Amino acid sequence: MKPFNRWVDRFCARHPRFGVGNLIMYLVLGNLVVWLFSIMDTTNSFLYYLYFMPSQIFRGQIWRLVTFIFIPSSNGILTLLFLYFYYFIGSALEREWGPVKFSLYFFSGMLFTIAYGLVMYFVTGQDVMVGGTYIYLSMFFTFAAFYPDQMVLLFFILPVKIKWLAYVDAAFFVYAVFTTSFPLNLLPVVAVLNFLLFCWDMVFGSFSAARMRQRRKTVDFRRAAHQARAQQANKPYRFKCAVCGRTDVDHPELEFRYCSRCAGYHCFCQDHINNHIHFTE
């Protein structure tokens, strides 16, 4: 994933005008307008003409390639709550990434969804009726990767960390995979693939960094002692304080000890064994 992320970063640097500034605001406003029109629709057919449907697109209804992202994720008053979260999260991601990368992220999610719908249409012959729900919900994962301990007020009442909402979101994705009929049940997987495409290094790189930090905390004293003796073989002293530089030759009255909390094999005099900054590398 690193080559892709490097390419994205270079593209963002070379094309600073590519992105749509305040993209999430336009998306939320579009969802809000569609929701209001759907409330006034007495025939319940308005939303039907906005979904992504390959068979209808090939009949000339090309607006479906775009309008499916403006279909609200829920009905009723909960729509306003979802739109508020979308705006909150999308605005934070745009500030973190910049308009260009955030636009690439969202448009990539759209392309993944469109490509999946077309492939399923040609392979299975089934007309896939798709909205943009999972594209928006996948933003929770990205936001949680950046700010796992960010506190939000659930229903404007209950304080909860965003990472727990991401876990709930992940559970909803898994539930949808096993309860929704094929091929719609794989739409959550498509959305997660887009998330991993942009955030793989950030998510799994942090795990690798944590493992490396844990490894550095564990000191192999036998190996470190052998290395220390090899380095000191040609030196005129046996012990040397890593803080003040005093040796057992210059100051035979001092006691010298090794710190078990430092990474490596470091010696300290009696004045600094309990009074030094621990080595981490």
Image (cartoon, helix red, strand yellow):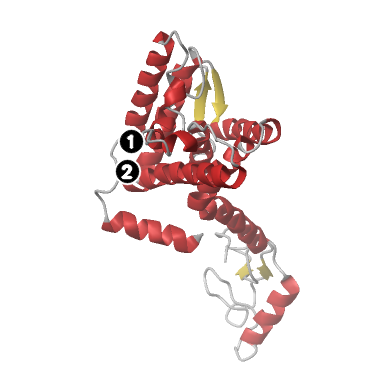
Counting residues from the N terminus, which is met first, the one under dot 1 or under dot 2?
Answer: 1
Tell me if label 1 and label 2 are in contact, CB under 8 Å. yes
**Viewer-nearest residue: 28 or 275:** 28
Position in image of residue 254 (x %, y %) = 64, 72
Residue type at tag 1: Leu
Q: Is residue 20 above or below residue 258?
A: above
User: Which quarter of the rendered picture does the C terminus lie within?
Assistant: bottom right
Instruction: Report x, y in % for residue 73.
Output: 50, 24
Mark 1 lies on a secondary structure that is helix
Q: Distance between the residues labelled 1 and 2?
A: 8 Å
Q: Which of 38 and 202 is in front in this view?
A: 38
Height in image: 104 above or below 45?
below
Q: Residue at x 52, y 70 (%)?
A: 244
> Badge 2 is on which residue?
99
Residue receiving disc 1 = 23
Q: Assign a secondary structure to mark 2.
A: helix
User: Comparing marks 1 and 2, which lies closer to the viewer?
Assistant: 1
Residue 218 pos. (x, y %): 70, 62
Give the x, y percent position of residue 193: 55, 48
Work out whether residue 261 can be spotted.
Answer: no
